Image (spheres, rainbow, N blue to C red):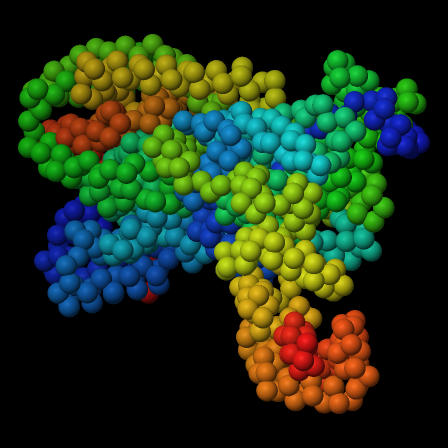
């Protein structure tokens, strides 16, 4: 029974709860049991909040019993990436510098989850400060890919993706600065959505790059992503960059798409996001899905976005520049780790230095140094200034492409999940993983990755759909249509093909 | 390095004969908004340390700033009062530097896009000369927290055992007003500097954007000064004297720097571009940070905020609602009151403009109001070493006091006793007169009794008066006044005495 509950989609679980076929306490406990059984191997969670989750679940059950009207996801448990602050629950952003820090406030999106009655199962592992594509940069150990425990679950949100792929949670929150929701989605066979920049409040997200960061849903189905997106999205007066408009009708679009009719939809294939560097199996699945979309009535057009070839370069100037400033507050003065220098005088400046030296990992230091350099007097125009110009060019490329196509598509990541350690010593190779996802962040447009079958190595690959800013609904329509067609061809969700995880006997 | 600071001082008069001083003044004013620049933390002076904070003003992970609309409005008010152009769109930037009183280790400020720019301010000097100061910009930023260094003898960081940080002040909105180089002040540079900051202070109060109390640090001035050999020469190297926090100190700091820099230049040494600290005790400055290896603040546009774009309609609304500026107001009032230039200047310098205006508004003549505030009240304020404003008497009470005198119910001498009562907290003048029984004796019956007694006591005087010599009548009046404890109207007494004697 436990097994069946954890395999339900969030939407189905929400319906079952609404029909009172089971209680939220049962559903939450089932997931907590699953975490206890498999997380020893997966290590998707940094903190499991058993009591808080069960308390929320009991509260929802009581409200339902009292006949209160509840959100469709009320009582459906969720995992939250550890970069999102949660009042009373430890929040580390995967960094030693925040080990044992307990925030005194909730992120806006967490307030919305709590308001709708979603029990929070715990906080998921990630690359330190969301810097990485493999979760190997977490200060607290690797998260494994449920498809192959020797492989990375993607990053930075490897924890959220693995939790959902490993049936530890039906829903999770991720954040995406250059692909940290979508790339883990691709390599774990799950759905990940980066909404339009400003679509979901950033208040309470520990910032990496303010102009690129965006929180979004990590789920197993497109409809689940839409339900979660609609819940966490929308204007927040605490975030000045938040869009003051209603969330696009993503749930309606997902339901419409699931009917399988894409007549009149123009799907643009980005020339620059294919070919060299893309694994054969990745390209093959992508081409097959294009055919599938055509079969559903979509018109396939080629579009060129020539500035995309500079996207990675621009990204690795803008992101570190903003990060170097955003991470300055971690200095041992007010919260988190505080390290005094081993010798010599204990001055504020030296404590800051010692704390940052001991608290930050190598990748974080690399980016802080890079960003500090890029912003320095005399280099600003050449680096940060030029990168901003590239950003404008990329936005123009998108604008031109969206004049020809309603959505743009590409493989989400050029390869399937690689093995631990494979790219750890080669930052550039690691960065190349995000080549297809980064342009969306630079332009602020929404992006989705959904399961697109298995590559020749038997590992999942992702299909990316991009839409114009504030037209997130378009990718839900196309995504839901493709998902339905693919699942009917596969005879069920892709995750059904994932190996069974070894479970630990429960001692309860 | 110290050579430049240990050369002899040149006398101020000598220095300004041979060198042309150029000023540049940066004034920070803390805005009197209810909440902080970027969050809803309440702002109140003197709260317990670290009680007026939010995740935003503490710089906690995840917190984001939101611009305080009221602060923008205040900044626009200041910009308009300084005859600036208000930007159609402007941005905040991050000024990155590590310091414990800066919670995020960057200050959110405006850098290349200030909200107001290209303005000017006419400053009136003590002798009435008007000096125009050009304003380069006025921009918005947030204040830092406050460090307290404990354990050292000096209260400075050097030698302290530990330091405490209070973030109540962190995030309080500031507007920084930067002048263009102020040239042509010549030997009056110290006075110009002082008058400029004083005029700004008055404007902040008139605009109601700040309490603008220097002693609380609501207004802080950094004074840049350089010397050149002649007004045609290029600008010399400047020093920046930080946080000069009283009007008098501004004047002293400029004088000292002129003397010091002249000494350096006379010795053939270069003036070092540096930050200097002013010492209240002896009026000197000493070197702080050397600016030539100034920190690189790595400014970049604040990505957490969208541009501030005040609509033209809003700006015009604010402009239309601007109160009259102090200088214009003083000119208008001087005209209305008919004061001579010197009289008006004394009134301004005594801080009595508002008090006299209110007294006049309560019905007193301009001359009457000036008589009180610049006379008896100024004397008492000086005696008690307080400002006129601090005396516990209101303009309305002064108006009532003057009305009592004019109606003849009390005389000037009694009025001073009534004032004693008012200042002692005995209530309004009317109440004091009644309670102390100070009303002028206007009952002729009572006066006649006293007069008859006085006449009976001095028959020789009566004889002389009857003989046509009115001179000695004063002795009778004096006796009557004494008998009535001064509460009689001397003019009436005289009439009655003469009448009684039969003259």
Question: Can you say which quadrant of the picture contains the C terminus of chain B?
Answer: bottom right
User: Where residue B315 sits in the image (x, y, percent)?
Assistant: 39, 34
Question: Can you say which quadrant of the picture contains the N terminus of chain B?
Answer: top right
Residue sitting at 51 percent across and 35 percent down? B81
Asked if residue A351 lies left or right of residue A475, the reply is: right
Q: How many marks?
A: 0
Tell which of A408 and A160 is nearer to you.
A408
Question: Vertically, is B498 above or below A188?
Answer: below
User: Where residue A209 sits in the image (x, y, percent)?
Assistant: 45, 32
For residue B225, what is the image quadrant? Answer: top right
Tell which of A300 and A229 is nearer to you.
A229
Quick one: which residue is furthest to the front in this view?
Answer: B467
Tell which of B287 and B267 is nearer to you.
B267
Asked if residue B31 lies left or right of residue A351, the reply is: left
For residue B500, what is the image quadrant? Answer: bottom right
Residue sitting at 36 percent across and 27 percent down? A441
Tell which of B134 and B26 is nearer to you.
B134
Question: Vertically, is B420 above or below A45?
Answer: below
Residue A174 at least partly seen? no
Residue sitting at 34 percent across and 9 percent down? A306
Residue sitting at 18 percent across and 53 percent down? A71
User: Where residue B327 sits in the image (x, y, percent)?
Assistant: 57, 39
Asked if residue B138 lies left or right of residue A179, the reply is: right
User: Where residue A11 sits in the image (x, y, percent)?
Assistant: 16, 47
Residue B73 at least partly seen? yes
Asked if residue A209 lies left or right of residue A414, the reply is: right
For residue B310, what is the image quadrant? Answer: top left
């Amino acid at each position: 029974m436990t097994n069946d509950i954890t395999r339900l989609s969030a939407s189905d679980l929400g319906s079952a709860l609404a029909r009172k076929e089971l209680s939220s306490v049962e559903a939450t406990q089932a997931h907590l049991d699953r975490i206890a059984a498999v997380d020893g191997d997966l290590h998707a969670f940094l903190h499991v909040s058993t009591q808080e989750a069960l308390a929320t679940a009991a509260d929802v059950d009581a409200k339902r019993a009292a006949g209160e009207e509840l959100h469709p996801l009320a009582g459906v448990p969720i995992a939250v990436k550890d970069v999102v602050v949660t009042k009373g629950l430890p929040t580390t952003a995967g960094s030693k510098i925040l080990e044992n820090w307990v925030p005194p406030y909730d992120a806006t999106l967490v307030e919305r989850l709590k308001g709708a009655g979603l029990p929070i199962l715990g906080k998921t592992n990630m690359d330190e400060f969301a810097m990485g594509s493999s979760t190997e940069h977490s200060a607290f150990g690797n998260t494994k890919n449920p498809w192959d425990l020797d492989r990375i679950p993607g990053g930075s949100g490897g924890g959220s993706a693995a939790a959902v792929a490993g049936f530890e949670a039906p829903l999770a929150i991720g954040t995406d600065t250059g692909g940290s929701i979508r790339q883990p989605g691709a390599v774990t066979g799950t759905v990940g959505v980066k909404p339009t920049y400003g679509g979901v409040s950033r208040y309470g997200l520990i910032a990496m790059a303010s102009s690129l960061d965006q929180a979004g849903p990590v789920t197993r189905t497109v409809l689940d992503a839409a339900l979660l997106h609609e819940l966490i999205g929308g204007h927040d007066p605490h975030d000045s960059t938040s869009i003051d408009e209603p969330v696009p009708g993503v749930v309606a679009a997902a339901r419409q798409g699931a009917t399988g009719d894409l007549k009149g939809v123009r799907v643009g294939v980005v020339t620059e996001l294919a070919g060299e560097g893309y694994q054969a199996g990745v390209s093959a699945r992508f081409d097959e899905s294009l055919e599938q979309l055509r079969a559903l009535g979509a018109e396939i057009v080629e579009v060129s976005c020539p500035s995309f070839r500079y996207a990675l370069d621009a990204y690795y100037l803008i992101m570190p520049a903003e990060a170097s400033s955003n991470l300055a507050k971690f200095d041992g003065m007010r919260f988190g780790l505080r390290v005094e220098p081993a010798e010599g005088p204990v001055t504020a400046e030296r404590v800051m230095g010692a704390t940052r030296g001991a608290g930050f990992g190598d990748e974080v230091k690399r980016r802080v140094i890079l960003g500090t350099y890029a912003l320095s007097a005399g280099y600003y125009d050449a680096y940060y200034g030029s990168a901003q110009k590239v950003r404008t060019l990329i936005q123009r490329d998108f604008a031109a492409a969206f004049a020809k196509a309603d959505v743009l598509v590409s493989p989400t990541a050029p390869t399937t999940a690689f093995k631990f350690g494979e790219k750890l010593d080669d930052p550039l190779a690691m960065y190349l993983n995000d080549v297809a996802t980064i342009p969306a962040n630079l332009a602020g447009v929404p992006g989705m990755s959904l399961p697109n079958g298995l590559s020749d190595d038997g590992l999942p690959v992702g299909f990316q759909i991009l839409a114009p800013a504030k037209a997130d609904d378009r990718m839900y329509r196309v995504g839901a249509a493709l998902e339905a067609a693919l699942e009917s061809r596969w005879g069920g969700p892709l995750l059904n093909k994932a190996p069974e995880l070894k479970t630990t006997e429960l001692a309860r | 390095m110290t050579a430049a600071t240990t050369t002899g001082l040149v006398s101020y008069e000598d220095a300004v004969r041979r060198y042309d001083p150029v000023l540049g003044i940066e004034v920070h004013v803390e805005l009197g908004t209810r909440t902080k620049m970027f969050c809803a933390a309440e702002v109140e002076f003197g709260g317990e340390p670290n009680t007026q904070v939010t995740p935003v003003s503490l710089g906690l992970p995840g917190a984001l700033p939101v611009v305080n609309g009221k602060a923008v409005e205040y900044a626009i008010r200041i910009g308009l009062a300084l005859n600036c152009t208000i930007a159609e769109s402007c941005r905040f930037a991050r000024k990155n530097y590590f310091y414990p009183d800066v919670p995020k280790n960057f200050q959110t400020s405006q850098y290349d896009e200030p909200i107001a720019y290209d303005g000017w301010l006419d400053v009136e000097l003590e002798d009435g000369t008007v000096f125009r100061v050009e304003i380069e910009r006025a921009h918005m930023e947030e204040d830092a927290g406050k460090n307290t260094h404990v354990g050292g003898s000096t209260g400075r960081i050097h030698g302290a055992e530990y330091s405490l940080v209070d973030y109540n002040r962190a995030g309080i909105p500031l507007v920084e007003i930067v002048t263009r180089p102020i040239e042509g002040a010549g030997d009056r540079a110290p006075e110009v500097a002082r008058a400029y900051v004083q005029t700004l202070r008055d404007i902040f109060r008139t605009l109601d954007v700040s309490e603008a109390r220097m002693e609380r640090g609501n207004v802080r001035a950094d004074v840049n000064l350089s010397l050149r050999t002649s007004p045609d020469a290029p600008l010399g190297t400047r020093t920046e004297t930080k946080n000069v926090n009283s009007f008098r100190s501004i004047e002293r700091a400029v004088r000292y720097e002129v003397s010091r820099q002249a000494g350096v230049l006379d010795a053939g040494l270069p003036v070092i571009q540096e930050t200097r600290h002013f010492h209240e005790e002896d009026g000197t400055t000493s070197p702080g940070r050397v600016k030539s290896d100034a920190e690189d603040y790595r400014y970049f546009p604040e990505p957490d905020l969208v541009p501030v774009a005040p609509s033209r309609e809003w700006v015009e609304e604010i402009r239309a609602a601007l109160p009259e500026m102090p200088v214009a107001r003083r000119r208008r009032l001087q005209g209305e009151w008919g004061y001579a230039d010197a009289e008006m200047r004394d009134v301004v310098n005594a801080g009595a403009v508002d008090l006299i205006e209110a007294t006049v508004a309560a019905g007193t003549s301009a001359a009457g109001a000036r008589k009180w505030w610049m006379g008896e009240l100024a004397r008492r304020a000086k005696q008690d070493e307080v400002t006129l404003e601090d005396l516990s008497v209101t303009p309305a009470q002064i108006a009532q006091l003057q009305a009592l005198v004019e109606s003849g119910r009390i005389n000037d001498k009694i009025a001073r006793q009534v004032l004693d009562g008012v200042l002692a907290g005995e209530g309004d003048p009317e109440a004091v007169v009644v309670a102390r029984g100070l009303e002028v004796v206007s009952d002729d019956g009572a006066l006649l009794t006293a007069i008859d007694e006085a006449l009976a006591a001095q028959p020789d005087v009566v004889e002389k008066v009857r003989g046509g010599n009115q001179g000695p009548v004063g002795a009778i009046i004096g006796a009557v006044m004494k008998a009535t404890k001064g509460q009689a109207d001397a003019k009436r007494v005289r009439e009655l005495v003469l009448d009684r004697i039969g003259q």
